[in-house]
Image (cartoon, rainbow, N blue to C red):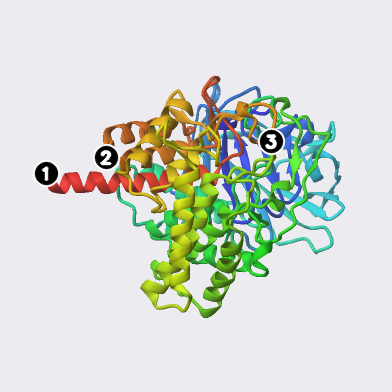
């Protein structure tokens, strides 16, 4: 059985990522990209779907583990009756080929180790042809080829490759797993210890750009590294998560593929990166955004592939039982074809943020914005599927209308602040029209709160973002009333649910946990309302939900006290960074005043 979601740590090479459990097993790895078929898929089934376990024989969970400094180099240690041993796991930033390096280091005594390598290509469905060639294990199936280089003797049994060996104090043994297309020559094997030094140097140099020095610097730095680890370096796109089909409710069917890039995340990502000093990454993400959305504005998608691919057909893998029997396992994401009005506003806001932050602009970018604005101007009155990709009927979601207002507002500001060309008087009038429409049809005066959609009574956590985008000031009574209503109706154990699934708006069966991004939005709302003590208390509680190496999934199950949803989730780490920055500014101001 797979471990708890929070039992995993991520290693990666800026093309893909692997999840390593506390038991020393790599239970998830897709090669060569985040969205490629997995060669280790035990996370979504059993070990028969593929894994690579490297641990002391007879041992289960490790004694302790940590990342080496500000890096994705993972150290896992076991203290046994025979001695102490450490396994160092990492993926060097991609060179000629994709490599997973595992170095076993003896710390004290003499410990007997075991390795079980069970390769299964195409999400556990294909058993490769395994041979020993030129002193290496070679596994081939269709387009995939893997080589394992180690000095430890291997033997085959039960369609897996096994090894047992001992390591004493001061000794170390390296394993290097390399992937390449099967039609290409054998790639050069990397040297494990040398690759370790180079990988640590890479991360140290990268993190040297970080400008955040606030109270929560450890959590912020780990979240930044996680965002970087989810980056697809060739394009600058950032995957929402490294996994597919980790459930929003244990045993449920709300299981989606998150190995793609969401436009929803664009502004949050840019804010987090730019405010922390990572201008190159912010520029690469913005350039990915420009390439991805280029074309007909009416064909704008809510998400794209890592390289900007538009079609992400959704299908199921019936041979996998799913994480803790949470079926089905889905590949692709049918929501990519939905109409979500908010993404036009999010793109326009993201491009405006880039311009105001000093990222080099171009005439082409402005022309694209003008095209997006033309579509928004003619279609903002249409119902849509909303921010949360509901698979029920389209509605006039309040957040979607507010983001339409945001897009128009940013176009007006671009003309006013940068002298760009556009019919600004017409846009100002449109901005006012949308504002009046939302306040008239999306606000329940009797209850003193905005609602999820026009004419409805349900609430939505996205309403917390209204003042953040400038739609209303924080101290507006309608904002305060909406925050109070969300705390009363959508909070579970103090954490925020996106909406009430039981109301049937999303057209799906089952429920879900508290959504961590929304809970960070509540931190920002409390901060904006001047309730600083409550904001910091909630922020600290959210930090306590991170696992032992600082990672967060998408949601928190308040009943079982477990992380749920895909992992690690960029949309949880982005708002963590932004909330920490806001709270740190207040802390700095208070300290200076004193």
Split into 4 quadrants, where in the image is the C terminus? Answer: top left
Q: Secondary structure at mark 2?
A: loop
Q: Secondary structure at mark 1?
A: loop
Badge nearest the viewer, 2 or 3: 2
- Real-space Cα separation, disc 3 to disc 1, in angstroms: 50 Å
Residue at horizontal 69 percent and vertical 41 percent from the top:
393
Residue 112 placement, left or right of 123: left
How many neighbours does mark 1 have within 10 angstroms: few (below 14), some (14-19), or many (20 or more)?
few
The residue beneath circle 2 is: 530
- Real-space Cα separation, disc 2 to disc 1, in angstroms: 18 Å
Examine the rendered structure and indicate whether residue 394 appears above or below residue 337.
above
The residue beneath circle 3 is: 255
- Real-space Cα separation, disc 2 to disc 3, in angstroms: 37 Å
Residue 431 percent location from the top left of the image: 45, 60
Residue 568 percent location from the top left of the image: 56, 41
Residue 376 placement, left or right of 178: left
The picture quadrant where one finds residue 456 is top right
Q: Decide which of tag 2 and tag 3 comes sooner along the chain.
A: 3
How many neighbours does mark 3 have within 10 angstroms: few (below 14), some (14-19), or many (20 or more)?
many
Q: Decide which of tag 2 and tag 1 comes sooner along the chain.
A: 2
Residue 181 tag number: none
User: 262 or 55: nearer the eye?
Assistant: 262
The residue beneath circle 1 is: 594
Q: Secondary structure at mark 3?
A: loop
- Give the residue at the far left of this rendering: 594
How many neighbours does mark 2 have within 10 angstroms: few (below 14), some (14-19), or many (20 or more)?
few
The picture quadrant where one finds residue 26 is top right
Residue 183 percent location from the top left of the image: 84, 62
Residue 66 visible in the current orientation: no
Split into 4 quadrants, where in the image is the N terminus? Answer: top right
Residue 465 placement, left or right of 287: left
């Amino acid at each position: 059985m797979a471990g708890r979601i929070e039992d995993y740590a991520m290693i990666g090479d800026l093309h893909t990522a692997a999840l390593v459990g506390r038991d020393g097993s790599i239970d998830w790895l897709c090669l060569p990209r985040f969205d490629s078929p997995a060669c280790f898929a035990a996370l979504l089934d059993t070990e028969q779907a593929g894994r690579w376990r490297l641990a002391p024989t007879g041992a289960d969970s490790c004694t302790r583990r940590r990342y080496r400094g500000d890096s994705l180099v993972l150290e896992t240690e076991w203290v046994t009756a025979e001695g102490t041993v450490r396994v160092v796991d990492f993926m060097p930033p991609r060179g000629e080929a994709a490599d997973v390096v595992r170095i076993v280091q003896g710390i004290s005594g003499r410990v007997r180790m075991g390795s079980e390598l069970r390769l299964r290509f195409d999400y556990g469905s294909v058993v490769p042809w395994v041979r020993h060639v030129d002193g290496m294990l070679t596994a081939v199936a269709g387009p995939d080829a893997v080589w394992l280089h180690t000095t430890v003797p291997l033997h085959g049994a039960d369609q897996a490759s096994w090894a047992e060996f001992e390591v004493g104090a001061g000794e170390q043994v390296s394993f290097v797993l390399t992937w390449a297309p099967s039609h290409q020559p054998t790639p050069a094997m990397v040297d494990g210890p040398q690759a370790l030094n180079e990988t640590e140097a890479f991360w140290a140099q990268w993190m040297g750009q970080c400008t955040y020095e606030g109270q929560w610097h450890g959590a912020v730095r780990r979240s930044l590294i996680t965002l970087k680890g989810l980056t697809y370096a060739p394009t600058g796109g950032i995957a929402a998560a490294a996994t597919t089909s980790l459930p929003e409710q244990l045993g449920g069917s709300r299981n989606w593929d998150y190995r793609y890039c969401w436009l929803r995340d664009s502004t949050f990502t840019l804010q987090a990166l730019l405010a922390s000093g990572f201008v190159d990454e912010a520029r690469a993400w913005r350039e990915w955004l420009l390439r991805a959305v280029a074309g007909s504005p009416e064909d704008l998608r809510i998400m794209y592939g890592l390289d900007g691919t538009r079609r992400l057909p959704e299908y199921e893998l019936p041979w996998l039982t799913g994480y803790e029997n949470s079926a089905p396992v889905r590949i692709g994401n049918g929501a990519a074809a939905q109409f979500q009005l908010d993404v036009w506003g999010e793109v326009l806001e993201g491009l405006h943020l880039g311009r105001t932050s000093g990222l080099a602009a171009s005439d082409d970018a402005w022309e694209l914005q003008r095209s997006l604005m033309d579509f928004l101007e003619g279609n903002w009155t249409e119902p849509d599927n909303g921010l949360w990709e509901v698979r029920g009927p389209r509605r006039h979601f309040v957040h979607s209308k507010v983001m339409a207002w945001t897009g128009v507002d940013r176009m007006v500001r671009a003309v006013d602040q940068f002298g760009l060309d556009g019919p600004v008087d017409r846009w100002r009038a449109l901005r006012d029209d949308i504002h009046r429409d939302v306040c008239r049809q999306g606000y329940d005066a009797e209850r003193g709160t905005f609602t999820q959609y026009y004419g409805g009574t349900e609430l939505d956590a996205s309403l917390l973002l209204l003042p953040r985008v400038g739609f209303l000031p924080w101290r507006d009574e309608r904002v305060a009333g909406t925050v109070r209503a969300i705390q009363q109706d959508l909070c579970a154990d103090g954490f925020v649910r996106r909406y009430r699934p039981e109301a049937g708006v999303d057209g799906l069966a089952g429920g879900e946990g508290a959504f961590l991004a929304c809970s960070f939005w509540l931190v920002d709302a409390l901060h904006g309302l001047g309730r600083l003590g409550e904001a910091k208390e909630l922020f600290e509680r959210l930090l306590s939900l991170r696992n032992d190496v600082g990672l967060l999934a998408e949601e928190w199950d308040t009943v079982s006290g477990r992380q749920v949803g895909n992992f690690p989730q960029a949309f949880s780490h982005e708002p963590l960074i932004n909330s920490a920055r806001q709270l740190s500014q207040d802390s700095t101001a208070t300290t200076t005043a004193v």
